[in-house]
Amino acid sequence: MRLTLSRLARLALLLPLAAGVTLAAQQASGPGPITNDDLVQGLKADGSNWLTFGGNYANHRFSPLTQITPDNVAKLQPLWTFQTNTLGNFETTTLLRDNVLYVTGPQNVAWAVDARSGRQIWRYRRELPDNLTACCGLVNRGFAALGETLFMTTLDAHLLALDMKTGAVVWDATLEDYKIGYASTLAPLVVKDKVIVGVAGGEYGIRGFIDAYDAKTGKRAWRFHTIPGPGEPGFNSWSGDSWKIGGTGVWVTGAYDPDTNAVFFGTGNPGPDYHGPSREGDNLYSCSLVVLDPDTGKLKWHYQFTPHDVHDYDATEVPILADLPINGQTRKAVLFANRNGFYYTLDRLTGKVIVAKPFVQTTWAKAIDPQGRPMLETGHTPDEKGERTCPDLTGGTNFWPPSYDPRTHLFFVNAREACATFYGYKSEYVPGQRFTGGAQQLVNNRDEKPFGALRAIDPVTGERKWEFLMPTPSRAGILTTASNLLFSGDGDGNLLVLDSRTGALLWRYQLGATLHGTSPITYMLDGRQHVLVPSGTTLTAWALPEGAPAGRP
C-alpha cells in the first residue's frame, strides 16, 4: 500500500493513542491497587516501585539497587527526555508504579509518563486563580498514592484526589481560603485510610495547621493547629493576639513510624518573621518537630529547635527515622538537619536530644543545653540598623531532601555556608498581604562568598565524616544506593555522583538546569537500573548501555 502524506499524518496521530491503549492494557494486567502494606514495605528489593515521597515512610531515600556502581557509573547514558513545556522548576519526587511514572510540576500541572519511552500517558492541569498569594515559587513537591488514586495539594489551598489511570479528579477538598494567604505545596503523606497534609503561607499571617482527610471521600477527619488556641497547652507562649496571625506553616512532607503509630512533621517560622516584639514568648509550635497520632491528630510530643525565632529558621526540613546503635543499645531516633545550622538526633519516643551540633557556621547560638534549648549568643536580634548572623535565612539546609544509609548509619545533607544582615521593624497585618516585619541582605563580598557542601554526618556523634565542596550553594536533594553511590546536584546545573563512603567525585554531567529542591529516584525496568533526574522542568531517564558489565560496589 502506498503511504500518502495524508495517510502518514493520520498514522502519526494514531501512534500516541495506540501507545496509550497498550499502556492501559499493561496497567490493567499489572499488580493490584496500592495497599497500606505496600506503603509500609517501602522500596522493594527488586527495585520495581517508588510509592512515597522519601522512598519509604522513614524518608531514607536509599535504594537497595546495585547494578550501577562506582566502577561503571561514568558509563550512564540518557535513554529519553520528557519536556514539560511548563514555566518554573520541579521540586517534586516522582512516584513509580507498574512501569508508569507520576510527577507533579509547577503551577499544579501533573503527568503520568511511560517509564520505558518517556511518552505522556495523561496530563492534568489545575485552573488556578489569578490572585494567588503563594510565596516563594508556584511549585509542588509530589503525589501520594493509595489504591488506584493519587493525591496532590494545590497552590489555592485544596487537596485533590486523581484517578491514577486517567488523571481525572475524583474529589476536591478545600483546606482554607487562599485569598488570605493560605496555599499548599507539600507531597501528602498517606497513613492507613487518611491523607495528611499541611499548609504554606507563614509570610502572610496565617495560622498554620496539619489536616487529615478520608482517602475515599475527601472528608476532613481532624485538624491540628500548629499554633495553640486559648486553653490549649502552649497558648501562653504567644503574647496578646499574636497567635491568630503567627504563621507556622507546614510545607514539607513528614515521616511515619508504623511501630509507634506516629507521624513526624517539621513546622515553619513564627510571623512576623523578624520582629520579635510583635509576638513575645517561645511561640509554640513554630520551628518545631511535632509528633501526632495519625488516627486522631492528637499531639504525642514536640521539640522546638528555635524558640522565639527571629531569623526565619523554619524547621520545615525532611525528618528521617532511623534505628541507631548507641552505647550498646538500639535507639529509635529522628535525624534532622535544621535550617538554623544545627544537626540533631532526637529520641523518637520522647523527643529528648541525643546529639545537637552545628553542621555549618552558626553564630546565633553557641550550643544546645542539656534541656534542649539553644544557648544564645548576644547581638543577634534584627533591628532597623541590621545585625549580621550565620546562617542566612535560607539556612544551613532547607526543604531539599537529605538521605540516610541504614547499613553504614551515615546521614547525608546538602549544606549551605552563608551569612546575612537581618533587619527587623514593626509592620501591620493586612489579610492577604506579606507580613514579615523585616528583611535580610546576603553577605556576598570578595572576602566572604556563600558556598555549598555535600556532607556525611555520623548521627550517633554528630561528627562530619567527609564533605564535597561546591563553589555555589545548591538546592538539590540526595539519593543514595546500596552500591555506595550518592546522587545529587550542584548550583551550576551539574548532576553529581559521589562515592557515599568517601565523598569522592565519580562522575558529573551538565544538565542545563539545576535540581531545585528535588533529587533523583532509581528503579529497575526490563532488567536495567534506571536513574530518573528532574532538572528545571525536564525529566531525563538514565541507564547503563545494554550488556554493560557489572562493576564492583
Image (cartoon, rainbow, N blue to C red):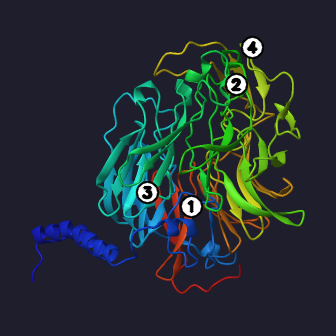
Identify the residue at image location x=74%, y=20%.
Answer: 382
In the displayed structure, 18 sits above or below 52; it is: below
Provide the residue designation for mark 2.
237
Instruction: Quarter of the image for the C terminus: give it.
Output: bottom right
Provide the residue designation for mark 4.
385
Name which of mark 1 and mark 4 comes first in the sequence: 4
Q: Quadrant of residue 328?
A: bottom right
Name which of mark 2 and mark 4 comes first in the sequence: 2
Marks 1/4: CA–CA distance = 43 Å
Name which of mark 2 and mark 1 comes first in the sequence: 2
Type of amino acid under label 3? Val
Residue 229 lies, in percent from the top left, at 58, 26
Q: Secondary structure at mark 2?
A: helix
In the displayed structure, 300 sits above or below 484; it is: above
Identify the residue at image location x=29%, y=60%.
Answer: 166
Type of amino acid under label 2? Ser
Provide the residue designation for mark 1.
520
How many C-alpha atoms fall within 10 Å of the one at disc 1: few (<14), some, or many (≥20)?
A: many
Front position in the image: 436 or 237: 237
Instruction: Quarter of the image for the N terminus: give it.
Output: bottom left
Q: Is residue 200 left or right of residue 26?
A: right
Q: Is residue 213 left or right of residue 501?
A: left
Front position in the image: 514 or 465: 465
Name which of mark 3 and mark 2 comes first in the sequence: 3
Provide the residue designation for mark 3.
103
How many C-alpha atoms fall within 10 Å of the one at disc 3: few (<14), some, or many (≥20)?
A: many
Can the viewer see residue 86? no
Circle number at residue 162: none
